[in-house]
Image (cartoon, helix red, strand yellow):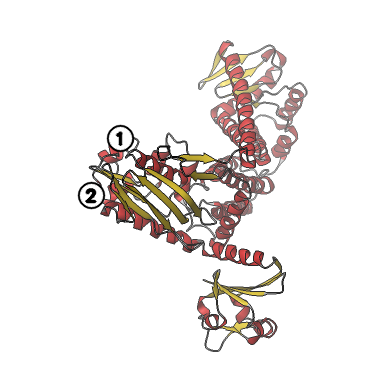
């Protein structure tokens, strides 16, 4: 989940940064620009975590979430295997494929870069703080401290400290320098620089994080320059002092320097006339990109949990899920303590409390007396499966996952074969048959005395969870039906040598001015009885409806108001496929 999240953040930051750079950078509303730069950071990091599906353009969002998983899955990941134990007394083996995969190397490279950038940041920050702490300072008022440094030729500020060498500047120039740097201090500009630096560290591989930092730095200088001129200082003399100081500057990182290297842009902004009010249209346009950015929103809230550290994962799960009850109950307070929940009587809990139990470390395992009830839901993760195995092992039994398969988007299990060995015998469950449909879940029980039940209905509370999980998995299937349909079609084409040509027609084309041409040349249109019409021209083709096999007769009975689009594909072997998608 880390790579998809960073990809989304990088794309969002890139789009928003480019929009600001091209449209807003040199507008005179510098205070608004500062807020907009903060908003860009917040949007880039938070939108991928906040479910705002109802805000975003649905078609763009669906297309993005159909494409991103394919990009992520193109990076090989370590394949996990659940292996049968070699002997009855052996523990359950949970192994990973040997050797490093590309994703492991990418994670290593990212981690090394992150460590190097963090080390560089801490080294510079500690050196700066140490120099400020050891230097004598005199108060200037409003909590501002002036540090006189004879070795410093380029004045700068950092939070409440202003560092300069008064002896190297004339009285008039010194007043302008102090006025400029005091504005940096009053407006807390150092906080902006630190935020931009931390973002650059986290996204060191993304060039837009470096561009964003320079944009922040420039806007802060514009703000301070404007404040100085508004205090009545003469513009040309101020610009001349800037030029003189720039010739002998040696900028320090993480600071607001009086003579920044973007001197030309600063002078340009000082000489620029105030922006006209029609420029607010640019701001409206840029903010509207946040609406489009909802296409990058994570589609399912539970995926947030996968990128959090294990220590706080249960807490994050509790915060993310809407099903949790009101805070303050004892059960909610014990969510981080597995021992406090492990032996709760399942039938004594309400559905709300069971929803909370669902997210404690040992998921889908309930103990009642000397009986352990277990269930494997459709949306079980590898962590869930491992947790169920550990729970069963604590009762002296062994669960081995012989095989399992997820849907193309890795959202739910489509097949599962498991075996439980107990001293009284063993049992096997084989669940799932359809490639794009979730399993209904499987369950059973074991007892410490050797009893074993496979497929039996669990206690009511656990059964409700199992049914709820299946309904949610079915909902995810419906949300991504187009993705599954396309995946099914791709597999069919691969078996037939691949595709060499395709045409897609939307519903409006079958009703518009080109309808007769499409009907005549492609054999597809709208009938007089308001159904989809397929003529004899395509009768020999293979037909699919939302990715599943269909027939010529069935498609001719499809109500036209349900029709969305049709794709005509030709395989390398000459076979034609008519793939119809409904709304």
Q: Which quadrant would residue 186 be assigned to in this image?
A: top right
Between 441 and 177, the one nearer to me in the picture:
441
Q: Mark 1 points at which residue?
A: 339
User: What kind of element bears circle 1?
Assistant: helix
Cα separation between marks 1 and 2: 18 Å
Q: Can residue 328 be seen in this view?
A: no
The residue shown at (50%, 41%) is 307
Between 286 and 310, the one nearer to me in the picture:
310
Where is residue 418 shown, x and y percent of the image? Answer: 42, 51
| Label 1 with label 2: CB-CB less than 8 Å | no
Q: Is residue 448 visible?
A: yes
Between 287 and 221, the one nearer to me in the picture:
287
Where is residue 542 shown, x and y percent of the image? Answer: 61, 76
Residue occupying the far right of the picture:
247
The residue shown at (60%, 50%) is 73
**CA neighbours of label 2 inside 10 A, class few (<14), some (14 to 19), many (20+):** some
Between 224 and 482, the one nearer to me in the picture:
482
Q: Which quadrant would residue 181 be assigned to in this image?
A: top right
Residue occupying the far bottom of the picture:
528
Where is residue 80 shown, x and y percent of the image? Answer: 53, 44
Q: Which quadrant would residue 490 be assigned to in this image?
A: bottom right
User: What kind of element bears circle 2?
Assistant: helix
Describe residue 164's horizontal placement relative to residue 58 as left or right.
right
**CA neighbours of label 1 inside 10 A, class few (<14), some (14 to 19), many (20+):** few
Q: Which of marks 1 and 2 is nearer the N terminus?
A: 1
The label on residue 61 is: none
Q: Mark 2 points at which residue?
A: 347
Count of marks placed on residues = 2
464 is higher (above) or lower (below) than 171: below
410 is higher (above) or lower (below) than 344: below
Where is residue 210 shown, x and y percent of the image? Answer: 67, 37
């Amino acid at each position: 989940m880390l790579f998809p999240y960073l990809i989304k953040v990088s794309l969002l930051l890139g789009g928003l940064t480019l929009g600001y750079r091209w449209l807003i950078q040199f507008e005179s509303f510098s205070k608004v620009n500062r807020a907009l730069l903060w908003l860009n950071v917040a949007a880039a990091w938070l939108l991928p975590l906040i479910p705002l599906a109802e805000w975003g353009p649905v078609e763009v969002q669906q297309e993005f979430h159909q494409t991103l998983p394919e990009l992520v899955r193109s990076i090989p990941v370590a394949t996990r295997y659940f292996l049968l134990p070699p002997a009855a007394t052996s523990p359950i083996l949970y192994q990973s494929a040997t050797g490093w995969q590309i994703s492991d190397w990418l994670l290593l490279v990212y981690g090394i870069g992150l460590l190097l950038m963090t080390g560089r940041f801490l080294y510079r920050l500690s050196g700066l703080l140490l120099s400020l702490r050891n230097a004598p300072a005199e108060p200037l008022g409003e909590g501002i401290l002036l540090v006189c440094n004879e070795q410093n030729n380029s004045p700068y500020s950092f939070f409440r400290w202003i560092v300069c060498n008064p002896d190297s500047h004339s009285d008039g120039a010194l007043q302008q320098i102090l006025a400029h740097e005091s504005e940096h201090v009053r407006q807390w500009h150092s906080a902006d620089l630190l935020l931009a630096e931390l973002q650059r560290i986290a996204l060191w591989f993304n060039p837009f994080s470096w561009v964003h930092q320079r944009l922040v730095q420039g806007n802060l200088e514009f703000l301070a320059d404007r404040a100085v001129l508004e205090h009545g200082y003469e513009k040309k003399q101020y610009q001349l002092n800037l030029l003189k100081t720039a010739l002998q500057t040696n900028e320090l990182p993480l600071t607001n320097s009086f003579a920044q290297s973007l001197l030309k842009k600063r002078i340009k902004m000082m000489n620029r006339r105030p922006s006209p009010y029609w420029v607010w249209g640019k701001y409206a346009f840029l903010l509207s990109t946040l609406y489009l950015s909802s296409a990058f929103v994570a589609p399912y809230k539970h995926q947030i949990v996968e990128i959090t550290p294990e220590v706080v994962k249960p807490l994050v799960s509790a915060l993310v899920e809407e099903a949790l009850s009101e805070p303050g109950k004892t059960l909610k307070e014990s969510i981080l303590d597995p021992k406090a929940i492990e032996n709760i009587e399942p039938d004594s809990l309400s559905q709300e409390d069971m929803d909370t139990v669902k997210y404690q470390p040992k998921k889908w395992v309930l103990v009642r007396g000397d009986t352990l009830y277990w269930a494997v839901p459709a949306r079980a993760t590898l962590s869930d499966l491992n947790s169920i195995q550990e729970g069963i092992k604590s009762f002296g039994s062994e669960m081995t996952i012989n095989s399992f398969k997820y849907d193309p988007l890795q959202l739910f299990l489509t097949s599962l074969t498991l075996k439980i060995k107990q001293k009284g015998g063993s049992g096997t469950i084989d669940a799932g048959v359809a490639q794009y449909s979730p399993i209904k879940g499987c369950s059973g029980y074991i007892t410490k005395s050797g009893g074993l039940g496979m497929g039996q209905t669990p206690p009511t509370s656990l059964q409700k969870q199992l049914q709820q999980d299946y309904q949610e998995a079915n909902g995810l299937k419906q949300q991504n039906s187009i993705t599954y349909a396309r995946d099914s079609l791709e597999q069919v084409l691969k078996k037939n040598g691949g595709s060499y040509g395709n045409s897609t027609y939307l519903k409006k084309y079958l009703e518009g001015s080109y309808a007769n041409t499409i009907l005549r040349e492609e054999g597809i249109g709208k009938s007089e009885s308001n159904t989809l019409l397929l003529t004899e021209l395509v009768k020999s083709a293979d037909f699919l409806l939302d990715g599943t096999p269909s027939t010529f007769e069935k498609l001719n009975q499809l109500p036209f108001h349900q029709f969305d689009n049709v794709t005509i594909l030709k395989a390398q072997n000459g076979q034609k496929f008519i793939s119809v998608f409904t709304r």
